[in-house]
Amino acid sequence: KAGVTQTPRYLIKTRGQQVTLSCSPISGHRSVSWYQQTPGQGLQFLFEYFSETQRNKGNFPGRFSGRQFSNSRSEMNVSTLELGDSALYLCASHPPSGTQYFGPGTRLLVL
Amino acid sequence: GIQVEQSPPDLILQEGANSTLRCNFSDSVNNLQWFHQNPWGQLINLFYIPSGTKQNGRLSATTVATERYSLLYISSSQTTDSGVYFCAVSQGGSEKLVFGKGTKLTVNP
């Protein structure tokens, strides 16, 4: 089976812009979760989607949003980018109550 | 919320040495995973181990759920084992993973 894929892998944006990141889960997995990794805060949970419904949301401002499509692919969007949004964004794909498998991540740099 | 503490924060070994990484968690969990983060940032799944003992080659892990800790053992370490090792847990009916701060392992030739 192909693993979790994330696009793009690298992204440079300027403050105030918005960005959309994409995640394609492992075939057959209907759950997708998103995490942000920064040197200061470590790995933090953003949100989880299952069958197109957001099941759980982390403690992030409303500028961070996401959605899931009927084929289980997920996107996350960050609007009005701030310098502090520079991070590695990781997507995980998993069956219910099972092992979570992570994609390679998207490195976002906000200038 | 649940707290996850990993120790030691940094570990430097010579190739061939053995090591033990520890993960303490503050509440009961329904999922515990160990990951190795490679130099490009990807989290590689090592073990899904909410309880019991598992082995995979030179790596093994033990989780004692009643005492709220897990151990990751690396034997005969190699330079390719270098990187950051994370422990992550979830609890209740949630799939949300809460990560520790990681142990940075450096294996010197």
Image (cartoon, grey):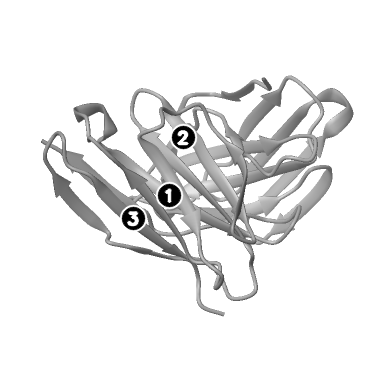
Q: Amino acid at mark 2?
A: Leu
Q: Which residue is mark 1?
A: A90
Q: Residue at x 63, y 40 (%)?
A: B96
First in residue order: circle 2 vs circle 1? 2
Per the image, label 1 sits on a secondary structure element best described as strand
The residues bearing labels 2 and 1 have C-alpha atoms spaced at a distance of: 9 Å
In the image, B57 versus A1, the foreground residue is A1
Q: Residue B34 in the image: x percent, y percent?
A: 62, 45
Instruction: Please report, as a chain letter, where disc 1 is located.
Output: A
The residues bearing labels 2 and 3 have C-alpha atoms spaced at a distance of: 17 Å
Give yes or no for contact between labels 2 and 1 (Cβ–Cβ under 8 Å). yes
Per the image, label 3 sits on a secondary structure element best described as strand
First in residue order: circle 3 vs circle 1? 3
Q: Is residue A40 left or right of residue B4?
A: left
- Specify whether residue B62 is in view: yes
Q: Would you call the spot at circle 1 few (<14 residues within 10 Å), some (14-19), or many (20 or more)?
A: many
Q: Which residue is mark 2?
A: A43
Q: Residue at x 14, y 45 (%)?
A: A13
Discs 3 and 1 share one subunit: yes
Q: Residue at x 55, y 67 (%)?
A: A72
Q: Amino acid at mark 3?
A: Leu
Q: Residue at x 21, y 30 (%)?
A: A82
Q: Which residue is mark 3?
A: A21
The residues bearing labels 3 and 1 have C-alpha atoms spaced at a distance of: 10 Å
